[in-house]
Image: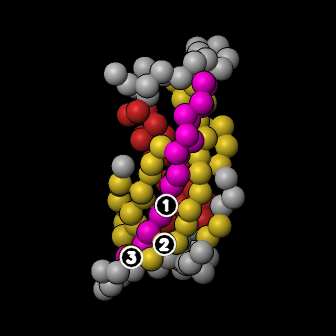
Amino acid sequence: MDTYTLVRTAHLNHNGKLFGGQLLQWVDEFAWLAAARDFPDVILVTRAMDNSEFRHSVANGSILRFHIGLQHTGTTSATYQVDVYAAMPACQEEKLVFSNRVVFVAIDEKGNKTKLFPAH
């Protein structure tokens, strides 16, 4: 699944570049959206994120593309690879700026792990 967002002034840090916490929020949210589509009858919560390495700073006005793919499915969890590409202002060429994996676990109404059932 691919999804896009625009970096705006409200997303910037004190140095005028994309705030890392904002990027992590988008990564978690967009990966969850992909997982919710793959497993619509399951309550999913974020269990873990892999090493978060910010490869390049991102300027205001950049268009970010989040490429999210299911990497592994276990009995109770699913792992998604998230690669984030930035097209800087006045430039159509994308640059990989961030990658990590997000693990979601299926839970029941009481918060206990439960089996993960894919969409039919």
Going by the image, does 77 lie left or right of 51? left
- Residue at mark 2: 96
**Mark 1 or mark 2: whose residue is earlier in sequence:** 1
Numbered range of the magenta stretch? 71-87
Q: Badge 1 local density, few (<14 within 10 Å), some, or many (20+)? A: some
Q: What element carries label 2?
A: strand
- The residue shown at (55%, 78%) is 57
Spatial CA distance of label 3 from label 1 is 12 Å
Going by the image, does 93 lie left or right of 21? left
Any magenta on residue 29? no
Name the kind of residue labelled 3 in the image.
Answer: Glu
Question: Image quarter for residue 20?
Answer: bottom right
| Magenta segment main secondary structure | strand
- Residue at mark 3: 94
Please say if the residues under marks 3 and 1 sit with CB atoms less than 8 Å apart.
Answer: no
Name the kind of residue labelled 2 in the image.
Answer: Leu
- The residue shown at (59%, 51%) is 101
- The residue shown at (44%, 51%) is 68
- Residue 62 at least partly seen: no
Please say if the residues under marks 1 and 2 sit with CB atoms less than 8 Å apart.
Answer: yes
**Mark 3 or mark 1: whose residue is earlier in sequence:** 1
- Quadrant location of the C terminus in the rendered image: top left
Please say if the residues under marks 3 and 2 sit with CB atoms less than 8 Å apart.
Answer: yes
Q: In this view, does 45 lie above or below 30?
A: above
Any magenta on residue 79? yes
- Residue 52 at least partly seen: yes
Residue 11's spot in the image, x, y percent? 49, 66
Question: Image quarter for residue 13?
Answer: bottom right
Spatial CA distance of label 3 from label 2 is 7 Å
Name the kind of residue labelled 1 in the image.
Answer: Asp
